[in-house]
Amino acid sequence: MLIFPPVRIAAMYEKMCCMPMGISYIASYIRDRYEVKILDSVAEGYEEERWLSDNYFEYGLSVEEIVKRVEEFGADVVGVSCLFSSQFLVVRDIVNEVKRRFPEVITVIGGTHPSFLPEDSFGRIEGLDFVVLHEGEESFLRLLDSLVRGYGWEEIDGLAWREDGGVRVNEKRSWIRDLDDLPFPARDLLPMERYFEINIPFMFFSRSSRNISFITSRGCPYRCRFCSSCYHWGRRIRYRSVESVLEELEELVVRYGIEEVKFEDDNLMANVGRAKEIFRGMIDRGLKLHWNMPNGVMIKALDDDELLGLMRDSGCYEVILAFESGDQYVVDHIIRKPLDLEKARGIVRKVKGYGIDAHAFFIVGFPGERMEQIERTFEYARSLDLDKAYFFIFNPLPGSELYDECIEKGLFKQEDLYIENYSMMGITTEEFEPSILRRLIHKNYWYFNFRQLFFDPKKFFTKYGRKLYRKETIKGLARIARNLMRIYLGI
């Protein structure tokens, strides 16, 4: 059984419910050899909420219900996904309870957090047997084969386990060269209609409730210092063939009635020629899909009129521009992102000129950043013709260069990954402390969320109207409003 665990978030954030692609790919890769079941605790228990404090809650199936499902399936091996550090404690509880109830069951975890902190993961999860590091399909299949034989996991690339009172880690050395060798994700093992019913995808918005997450590549050649993706998926981009991408898109339309695709690649536009081929193929095949890129897009790649025209004509209605900072010094020297902010102004105008909405990501509170640079980020965001902007407090991500720097400088402790409000914690320096940044973020977040109501009310209600009629949206907004009152009024 492969499990996507419940999610723990701060009260001011909206809940999401996305198809778990990682375990869906693993399930498809092993299903010819092993009986496999996927349990998405979030989709199946989306309405279940457990408050951990006034400002923090968990949603999804309870640990008790998850263990009950493990028993009903009769699992010999239980694998639990741990994408984010904020999920680690509930992953710990699931693994330990499975092992307590069924000592003979082999327990495995994978995902970003344990991939970078395997020794720490074993130290905190008594019932854990194995950690699969980084890209998991080949390593997990080889692990299952070795368990059948009773030996051989010592030779598996990208695997960690307990040995001689310690932890042995076989670092990840090889990656799947040809992504076309991977079967399509095992979506038939997931409650697909449930995702369409809930319709709160990654970054919240959709044109159609029948939307789905999708990737066409893995890996990243860039080394932005706040990000761990290039280390998790490898520093060489590996592409699926254009034909494979289009075949899967056609299958999604025919089999599931998909009307919208969420391209979640880290670098969909890194190869502009390939991207154009995909979009031309979508047009030529008459797929008539809406699509966007909720994970962000390389801004400089959009300085191409032919590309933008093909994006629009193939159904792109929105891009999220990954600025990260509005101060060029921070971009160049602190996060080291290949981006010219002045040129980016013209690219935003160009994107808007093709009728595509422009959203943006910004992060404040990097180590070494000054308050005037943080203010400059907000000023830069306000100076652009953006439809929406998302502001985040910098949190050190395990595996990133800035995580190591924060640990070395004493700005952050590994133990901080496991405290309740890690997702909103930030770091404290001589220049700023997180409560100041939170106030600035809230102020600018609401400015961007509601200015469209006054300047373009038709567009505002077209975008948000359908969401506002949903009971879950109203409940979420009330929760966020209460949390903001606590922050600002101390009630």
Image (tube, rainbow, N blue to C red):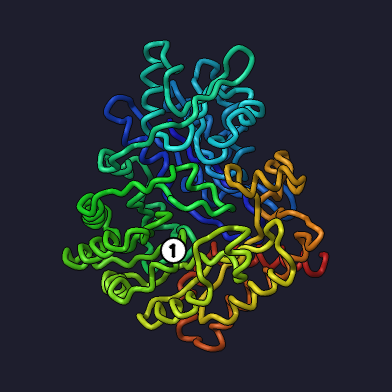
The amino acid type of the residue labelled 1 equals Met
**In the image as oriented, which residue stretches furthest toward the left?**
284
330, 85: nearer the viewer: 330
Q: Residue at x 35, y 80 (%)?
A: 354
Q: Is residue 390 left or right of residue 490?
A: left
Q: Residue 196: where, in percent of width, then height?
A: 39, 57
190, 125: nearer the viewer: 125
For the N terminus, the image quarter is top left
471, 463: nearer the viewer: 463
59, 407: nearer the viewer: 407
- Residue 163 vs 10, above or below: the answer is above
For the C terminus, the image quarter is bottom right
Residue, disc 1: 298
Any part of residue 270 in sight? yes
Q: Residue at x 48, y 42 (%)?
A: 232
Q: Residue at x 58, y 75 (%)?
A: 449
